[in-house]
Amino acid sequence: MSKIKVLGFDADDTLWVNEIYYRETERELVKLLKDFADEKTVMEQLYHLEIQNLPLYGYGAKGFMLSMIETAIQTSGHRVPAQIIEKIIGLGKELLNKPVILLDGVREVLEYFKTKIPVVLVTKGDLLDQERKLRKSGLASCFHHIEIMSDKQEENYRKLLQRLTIQPEEFMMIGNSLKSDVLPLLKLGSWAVHIPYHTTWIHEKTNEDPHQWERFIAIKKLAALLDILDNEGNILIHE
Amino acid sequence: MSKIKVLGFDADDTLWVNEIYYRETERELVKLLKDFADEKTVMEQLYHLEIQNLPLYGYGAKGFMLSMIETAIQTSGHRVPAQIIEKIIGLGKELLNKPVILLDGVREVLEYFKTKIPVVLVTKGDLLDQERKLRKSGLASCFHHIEIMSDKQEENYRKLLQRLTIQPEEFMMIGNSLKSDVLPLLKLGSWAVHIPYHTTWIHEKTNEDPHQWERFIAIKKLAALLDILDNEGNILIHE
């Protein structure tokens, strides 16, 4: 029987609301640009620029703000006035200041494991923004270690496991993104628990099916994690 | 006699050129806005906005880009055209793509310590940007660990020492900023080596004098570090 020595949790849309704030901000952007372009044009241009800028900016709100500004310039044929650019910067600042709303069962599950198994928070995006969200969440004391990665790729997880000095099969990652939180871990030989969130950024979508992997588990509510692991890290279901 | 178990190096303007790229970018911004405001007005507004936005954006190039855009909007009284905003974004992208030019003695000193004492890179700013610079520098293999902090305050250094499981007096930090790389370490009881760079961002300036601290060392060239520490980490000068 496998024994888990460290648990990893994704943050955005696993512990707290995030993606819907981005969707709200996009809807406001579409409204601001309605005299220049229709919704479809704005949204397509924004996604195109976000992906194009990703290697340079990385994930997070500041890169998103800069891509929104470029979207305004390009979809308006350089006609967008400074007032609207200023409002876009305001939308971005609001996004950075959104409240941190915990998802169902998060506090209970983290408090349960706190004294039993070391838990690491594994997230990507702007360093300061993620630190601020963690502080606002009131959950900081539940984590043994915070790992903020520029991207959640297999190689970065491999380095994390090395630093934690554990074997892949002794690590279990829990998150809402198959692409970032589940598949790279399964490929490494770790356990991965998928808990879907109702909204997913297109870039996080994947056609790969995790069900071929033995160490894949899908749950609908975070509290179900307590049926999967006992308080010593023993896995209570299949392998 | 003290023995150093881990060495910490700052990155920007300690290992490689950084601040002069920001100064160049600011000069280009002043040129772009010359029809709206004079140099002094632009520079003062930019600095004001950078400091105002710091708690929200943190350090790094993306926050700097957003503050440059706000500067353009405000100093032009909302008259700046989208073409100029687009050029400012272009300046920021160029800044992110600047070559990494190592400072004198960096490669030699890091290669010397590589097999002798664990060396950590301790930096602040955008996560992805710092990772990119490290990769471009060709120095990644010299570091045992990379620590990217949202801010270089005493508390963050304290946590780093805890993770490294060493005592403050077993750590020596080397950097160009008295405020970020020297004073917080001295206050913790660690050693700090100051190696000044010819250009310092106003925000990094301080009136505090580090000479009152016994574990403060000032050097003019990085190679002088080899006269301060032997290859086992023994400190060869005063305490």
Image (tube, coloured by chain):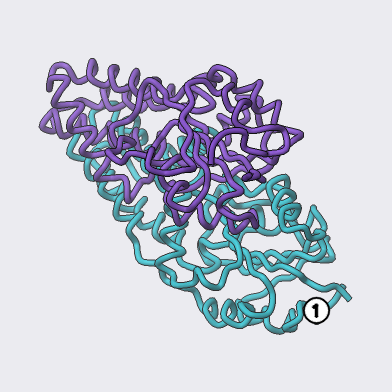
Chain colours: A purple, B cyan
Task: Find residue B36 and report its horizontal and vertical position in percent.
Answer: 26, 36
Tell whether A67 sits left or right of B49. Answer: left
Is residue B42 something one can see in this rendering?
A: no
Q: Nearer the viewer, residue A92 or A51?
A: A51
Task: Find residue B50 and report its horizontal and vertical position in percent.
Answer: 47, 39
Q: Give the residue displayed 52% in from the left and 53% down from the top.
A: B201
Q: Is residue A184 above or below residue A135?
A: below
Q: Is residue A131 above or below residue B178?
A: above
Res A233 → quadrant: top right
Q: Give the residue displayed 59% in from the left and 28% down from the top.
A: A225
Q: Is residue B59 above or below residue A85?
A: below
Q: Is residue A15 above or below residue B126?
A: above
Q: Nearer the viewer, residue A207 or B144?
A: A207
**Residue type of the residue flagged with mark 1:** Asn
Q: Give the residue displayed 74% in from the left and 50% down from the top.
A: B158
Res B43 → quadrant: top left
Count of residue discs: 1
Report in which chain the residue with disc 1 lies: B
Q: Give the residue displayed 47% in from the left and 21% down from the top.
A: A220
Which residue carries the number 1 mark? B234
Task: Find residue A26 and report its horizontal and vertical position in percent.
Answer: 29, 22
Is residue B114 something one can see in this rendering?
A: yes
Secondary structure at badge 1 equals loop
How busy is the neighbourhood of tag 1: few (under 14 within 10 Å), some, or many (20 plus)?
some
Res B173 → quadrant: bottom right
